[in-house]
C-alpha cells in the first residue's frame, strides 16, 4: 500500500493501465455503435498509452533543473508521450487528462489524497478544454465524476481518495446511456469512458495493492441502431468558424462587436493574460459569411488554426477540436527551419491509390490513423512556413489540431480543414491557389470541401438496427455523410442507388474511389449507370485501395 505516488508508482500505473487496456481493447472497440468494421477507440487508447510508456522509459533518468519532483517529471513524460502518440479523439483527450495531472502534481512534494483530488479536477478542466463542443455522456462526464468524488472525500488518505474516484467513475460510466441518446438506443456505455475506468482501476491497484473486480463485459444488444450526435448548428447560419487569435484586449473588444453583427453562438475566451499584453484567444462563431469572420480576426490580430465547418456536412465527433497543451515543449529540435512564405499541404490517406492521388496534387501524405507526432513530423518535413492539414476522418481532426498547435510552437502556421472523406480532400486540393493569401486559400479549400457531399459503401460487420432499417452481417450499407441511408444485398445495385439518391439533390461531378476489396468492374458498372441515368454529369473514377469500403463517392 502507498501513502504517496512516487515516480516508480507512476511507472507501475502506466504499465498496469496499458495491460488492462490491451486486455479489453477489442471489447472497447466493439462499444462503437456503428455496424461497420472501423471501431477503434480501444486501439487508439492502447497506442496512445504505449507512446506514453515509451517516453517514460526513454528519459526518466534525468530530472530537469526547475524544481520538478521525480514523480512530476514522470507524469510530464507520460503526458508528453501521450500527446505525440495520441490517435483519435480518445487519445487526444487522454493526453490532456495526463497533462492536467502532471501540471498539478509536478511541484507537489508528496502526493496525498487532496493533491490527487486537485489534480483530477485539473485533468477534468484540461479534458473539457480539449473539446470544442463538449458532450455529456462521454469520457468527459466520467473524469468529472471522478474528480468530484475525490474532492468530496476531503481526505489526505491516498487510498481512500483513489478508491472514491474510481468508484464514481464506474458509476458515471453506467449513467452515460442516460445522457447520450445514441448510447441508450444502442444499449452500450461510452467507449472512451470505459477506457478511463480501466486506468483508474489500475491506479487503485497500484496504490492499495488490491486487484479491482474484473469489469462485467458489456454485451451488445442484438440490433443496436446506427445513430450519432450531430451538430445541429444555428438555424439561420450555415457555417461554424473557429480560430486561435493572438491579439490585445482592446482589439478583441472590437472583434466581439463585429462578429456579433455577423452571426450568433459567439464565444471568445482568452488564456488569462494581462490586459496590458497581447493574449491568445479562442474564437468561435456561427456565420454565413466565412470570409468576413476571418477578416475580422485579421483586423484584430494574428489568427491561426482556422477551421470552417459547414453544419450540413458535419458528422458526429466528440472532441473534434483539440485545445493547446499548456506549456508543451517542442517535439523535436529546430534544425529544420521553415522557409518564409512557403506553403504545403499534408493529407491523411488510407489506401495506396488515394495516397498516389494526393501525392500527384503535391501534398505530403500520412498513412491513416496517424499519431500527433507522425502528423507533426510530416508538417515539419515540408519545410513550409504555412501548412494546411486535411485529416479526412472525424476522429483524426483532434489529432490534427494537436499537431497544429505543436507546429505553431516551432514557427509553422497550420490550418486544419475539417475534411471527413478523401473525396472532400480532393475537392479542397482542386481549388488550392498559392497566389492567394494563405487565409483566403484555406477558406476556399474549406468551402470546396463543405460543398462536396460524400458517401461510403461497405458490408455490415454485425447485426444492427439502423435509421434505414435492420441490417445483418454481410448486408451492403450505403452511408451518406456518416449515416446509413440504404441497405441492400447486391453491391453494384446499392452503389448505383446511393449515387441516384445523392444526385437527386443536384450535382455536376461524381468522384468514385474503389477500395482494396472492390470487385473487378465495380467502377465501370457505376459509371455506366450514371451515364444512362444522369447523362450530363461528369464522372471521375480512381482505384483508391482504401480498406473496409469498396466504394467512396463524392458529389459536387
Image (cartoon, helix red, strand yellow):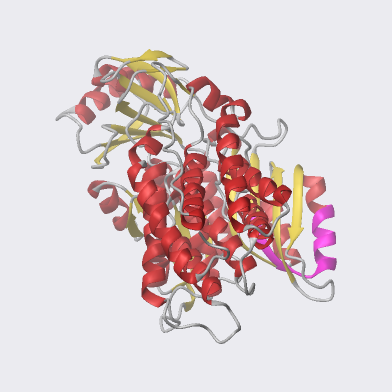
Q: Is residue 346 visible?
A: no
Determine the residue positioned at 26% across, 46% down: 351
The percent coordinates of residue 472 (x first, y second) are 31, 16
Q: Is residue 409 visible?
A: yes
Instruction: Compare residues 428 and 115 and report the one nearer the observer.
Output: 115
Quarter of the figure with residue 324: bottom right
Instruction: Compare residues 552 and 219 and report the one nearer the observer.
Output: 219
Residue extending furthest toward the left = 520
All told, the count of numbered labels is 0
The percent coordinates of residue 263 (x first, y second) are 76, 43
Determine the residue positioned at 73% across, 32% down: 236
Determine the residue positioned at 82% across, 67% down: 249
From this view, report whether residue 175 is shown above or below residue 487.
Answer: below
Look at the image and say whether residue 512 sits in the magenta stretch.
no
Q: Which residues are magenta?
A: 243-257
From this view, report whether residue 434 is shown above or below residue 391.
Answer: below
The percent coordinates of residue 368 (x first, y second) are 34, 50
Q: Is residue 232 left or right of residue 556?
A: right
Q: Main secondary structure of the magenta part?
A: helix
Look at the image and say whether residue 255 sits in the magenta stretch.
yes
The percent coordinates of residue 492 (x first, y second) are 24, 20
Residue extending furthest toward the front = 1
Q: Is residue 124 left or right of residue 400?
A: right
Quarter of the figure with residue 553: top left
Residue extending furthest toward the top = 469
Residue extending furthest toward the bottom = 65
Instruction: Compare residues 536 and 320 and report the one nearer the observer.
Output: 320
Q: Is residue 118 left or right of residue 174?
A: right
Where the C terminus falls, by quadrant?
top left
Amino acid at each position: 500500500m502507498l501513502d504517496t505516488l512516487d515516480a516508480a508508482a507512476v511507472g507501475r500505473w502506466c504499465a498496469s493501465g496499458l495491460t488492462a487496456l490491451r486486455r479489453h481493447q477489442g471489447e472497447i472497440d466493439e462499444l462503437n455503435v456503428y455496424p461497420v468494421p472501423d471501431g477503434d477507440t480501444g486501439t487508439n487508447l492502447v497506442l496512445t498509452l504505449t507512446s506514453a510508456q515509451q517516453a517514460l522509459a526513454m528519459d526518466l533518468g534525468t530530472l530537469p533543473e526547475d524544481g520538478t519532483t521525480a514523480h512530476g517529471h514522470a507524469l510530464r513524460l507520460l503526458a508528453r508521450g501521450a500527446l505525440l502518440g495520441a490517435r483519435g479523439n480518445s487519445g487526444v483527450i487522454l493526453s490532456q487528462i495526463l497533462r492536467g495531472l502532471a501540471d498539478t502534481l509536478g511541484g507537489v512534494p508528496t502526493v496525498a489524497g487532496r493533491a490527487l483530488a486537485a489534480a483530477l479536477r485539473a485533468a477534468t478542466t484540461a479534458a473539457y478544454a480539449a473539446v470544442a463542443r463538449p458532450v455529456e455522456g462521454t469520457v468527459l462526464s466520467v473524469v468529472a465524476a471522478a474528480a468530484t468524488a475525490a474532492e468530496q472525500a476531503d481526505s489526505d488518505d491516498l487510498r481512500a481518495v483513489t478508491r472514491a474516484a474510481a468508484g464514481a467513475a464506474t458509476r458515471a460510466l453506467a449513467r452515460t446511456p442516460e445522457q447520450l441518446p445514441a448510447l441508450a438506443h444502442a444499449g452500450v456505455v461510452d467507449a472512451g469512458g470505459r477506457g478511463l475506468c480501466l486506468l483508474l482501476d489500475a491506479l487503485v491497484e497500484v496504490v492499495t495493492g488490491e486487484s479491482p473486480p474484473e469489469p462485467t463485459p458489456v454485451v451488445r444488444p442484438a440490433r443496436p441502431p446506427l445513430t450519432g450526435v450531430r451538430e445541429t448548428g444555428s438555424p439561420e447560419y450555415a457555417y461554424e468558424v473557429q480560430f486561435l487569435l493572438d491579439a490585445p484586449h482592446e482589439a478583441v473588444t472590437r472583434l466581439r462587436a463585429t462578429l456579433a453583427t455577423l452571426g450568433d453562438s459567439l464565444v471568445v475566451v482568452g488564456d488569462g493574460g494581462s490586459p496590458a499584453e497581447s493574449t491568445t484567444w479562442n474564437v468561435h462563431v456561427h456565420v454565413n459569411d466565412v470570409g468576413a469572420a476571418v477578416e475580422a480576426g485579421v483586423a484584430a490580430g494574428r489568427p491561426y488554426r482556422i477551421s470552417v465547418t459547414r453544419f450540413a456536412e458535419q458528422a458526429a465527433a466528440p472532441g473534434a477540436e483539440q485545445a493547446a497543451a499548456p506549456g508543451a515543449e517542442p517535439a523535436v529540435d529546430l534544425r529544420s527551419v521553415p522557409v518564409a512564405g512557403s506553403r504545403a499541404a499534408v493529407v491523411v490517406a488510407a489506401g495506396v491509390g488515394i495516397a498516389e492521388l494526393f501525392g500527384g496534387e503535391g501534398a505530403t501524405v500520412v498513412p491513416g490513423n496517424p499519431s500527433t507526432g507522425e502528423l507533426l513530423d510530416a508538417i515539419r518535413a515540408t519545410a513550409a512556413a504555412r501548412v494546411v492539414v486535411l485529416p479526412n476522418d472525424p476522429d483524426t481532426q483532434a489529432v490534427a489540431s494537436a499537431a497544429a498547435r505543436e507546429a505553431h510552437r516551432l514557427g509553422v502556421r497550420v490550418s486544419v480543414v475539417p475534411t471527413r472523406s478523401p473525396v472532400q480532400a480532393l475537392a479542397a486540393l482542386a481549388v488550392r491557389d498559392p497566389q492567394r493569401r494563405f487565409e483566403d486559400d484555406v477558406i476556399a479549400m474549406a468551402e470546396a470541401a463543405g460543398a462536396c457531399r460524400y458517401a461510403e459503401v461497405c458490408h455490415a460487420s454485425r447485426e444492427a438496427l439502423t435509421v434505414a432499417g435492420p441490417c445483418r452481417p454481410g448486408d451492403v450499407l450505403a452511408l451518406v455523410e456518416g449515416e446509413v441511408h440504404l441497405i441492400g444485398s447486391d453491391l453494384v445495385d446499392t452503389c448505383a442507388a446511393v449515387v441516384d439518391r445523392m444526385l437527386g439533390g443536384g450535382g455536376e461531378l461524381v468522384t468514385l474511389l474503389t477500395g482494396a476489396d472492390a470487385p473487378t468492374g465495380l467502377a465501370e458498372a457505376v459509371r455506366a449507370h450514371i451515364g444512362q441515368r444522369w447523362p450530363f454529369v461528369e464522372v471521375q473514377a480512381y482505384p483508391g485501395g482504401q480498406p473496409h469500403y469498396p466504394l467512396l463517392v463524392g458529389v459536387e
